[in-house]
Image (cartoon, rainbow, N blue to C red):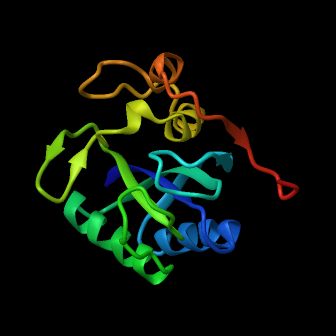
Amino acid sequence: MHQVVLSLGGNMGDRLSLLNNARELLTRQMKLERASTIYQTAAWGGNSQGAYLNQVLVLNTAMGAEDCLNYIQQIENQLGRQRIMKWGDRTMDIDILYFDDEIINTERLKVPHPYLIDRNFVLVPLAEVLPDFVHPQMGKSSMVLMEECEDSLKVKQWTDLD
């Protein structure tokens, strides 16, 4: 079995239902070990408008990394993902942050995720569920990466009052 760490997020439609649907679909083929709190964050990258809901999941899977990516992309498509603009609005985005402690660098897949160290919306929930996990390239824990991140976008725990 492999440990895969995923970041889920979206800013279109019923964001909470889409997160819940994504988690349910993922657990049809993977075993959920840990789930972070759901966080609301401002859009990152400059091409999105509405606030995102984000969550990090730690799962176990028998799939290899490429098969895992294929499965994730099927779920994104099933939940209405349209790839129109990089860092644009979306119903669901699922990124592989880590796959075990492997370093993968193919045309389709880069693991650890190349932007995770720059994004509070990833690091805050990641540090919640895997505070001591060491980034295999940076040699720093999730907690240290979060503390060192220069991203100024606010990340707050989401409530249904938001």
Q: Residue furthest left?
A: 106
Residue 157, horizontal then vertical, whole percent: 74, 42
Residue 34, horizontal then vertical, whole percent: 57, 48
Residue 43, horizontal then vertical, whole percent: 56, 49
Q: Is residue 31 left or right of residue 135?
A: right
Give the quarter of the image for residue 108.
bottom left
Residue ID at (20%, 63%): 66
Give the quarter of the image for residue 30.
bottom left
Q: Nearer the viewer, residue 66 or 44?
A: 44
Residue ID at (48%, 61%): 31
Residue 18, horizontal then vertical, whole percent: 61, 72
Residue ID at (69%, 66%): 16
Q: Is residue 108 left or right of residue 92?
A: left
Quadrant including the C terminus: bottom right
Q: Residue furthest right?
A: 161
Eyeballing the image, is 85 above or below 99?
below
Quadrant including the N terminus: bottom left
Give the quarter of the image for residue 75.
bottom left
Q: Nearer the viewer, residue 54 or 140?
A: 54
Residue ID at (64%, 68%): 20
Q: How many marks?
A: 0
Eyeballing the image, is 23 above or below 104?
below
Eyeballing the image, is 84 above or below 130?
below
